[in-house]
Amino acid sequence: MTFGFASSSAASLSTSASAASASRLLEPAEWAAAGIPLLRNPREVVSGLHARHHPKPLTAIVAVLDPDERLRASASFTRRTAPADGWMFRNALLAQLRRVIPHDLRRRTPVRTAVLLYCREGDARWTEEDGAWMWGLRDACTLHGLRCGAYITLTHDGWQVLGENRGGRRPNAHSTPEPVATSEAPPLVPRTGGPVSDVLRRAAAR
């Protein structure tokens, strides 16, 4: 009797976990209704990330863009071969964001935008895995003080901005990366003026 009860309890927990995982994804209609900001030049963003990270299937690239859509930071990592779960994806994205760029939680309104490019097998049609990535991206942005931006898939057929019906054949999951061009962010220029700069100038003059 005890063994039978334990088995039933385990099955119940498994069912509950599956139901919770299924709720941590966004359907295309939910994503479209969320007011995700449109990329002005998605091809340039995709080409730039593809050139920097050379993604293969199961590679995710999270990137942070400034208000002028210039790249400020990006990181890539390989997705674990485990069932798609938005909570796990959120944690992975948040860990990468914390590693490459400070949070903007002190701002009243987010200024920078995070976008996600995911390279996978299959075609460009939405999958539950895509829905889990969307959920994870939205939640990670909230926790890091960023605007939630576009979710882009990169497959054998090319790239596709989900929810926008915009895409192209190149780059794709198996194409050779092109040289980084206009998407290159300019180097940050040190600020000048003020008491700190005066101290540095005096120290350099000695």
Image (spheres, rainbow, N blue to C red):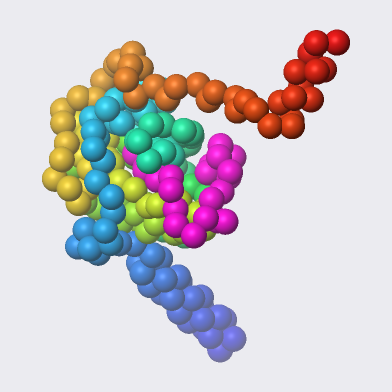
Whether residue 43 sits left or right of residue 109 in the image: it is left
The magenta region covers: 95-117
Q: How far across and how far down the image is residue 157, in percent?
A: 17, 32
Q: Is 115 in the magenta?
A: yes
Residue at 56% across, 48% down: 103
Q: Image quadrant of residue 30?
A: bottom left
Foreground of the two, 65 or 89: 65
Is residue 91 visible from the viewing direction of this image? Answer: no
Whether residue 136 sits left or right of residue 104 in the image: it is left
Number of numbered markers? 0
Q: How far across and how far down the image is residue 45, in percent?
A: 31, 31
Residue at 33% across, 13% down: 179
Is 134 rendered above or below residue 203? below
Q: How far across and how far down the image is residue 4, in percent?
A: 52, 83
> Looking at the figure, which quarter contains the N terminus?
bottom right
Is residue 180 visible from the viewing direction of this image? Answer: yes
Foreground of the two, 140 or 126: 140
Q: Is 134 in the magenta?
A: no
Is 114 rendered above or below residue 200? below
Foreground of the two, 2 or 175: 175
Foreground of the two, 130 or 182: 182
Q: How far across and how far down the image is residue 34, in percent?
A: 28, 61
> Looking at the figure, which quarter contains the C terminus?
top right
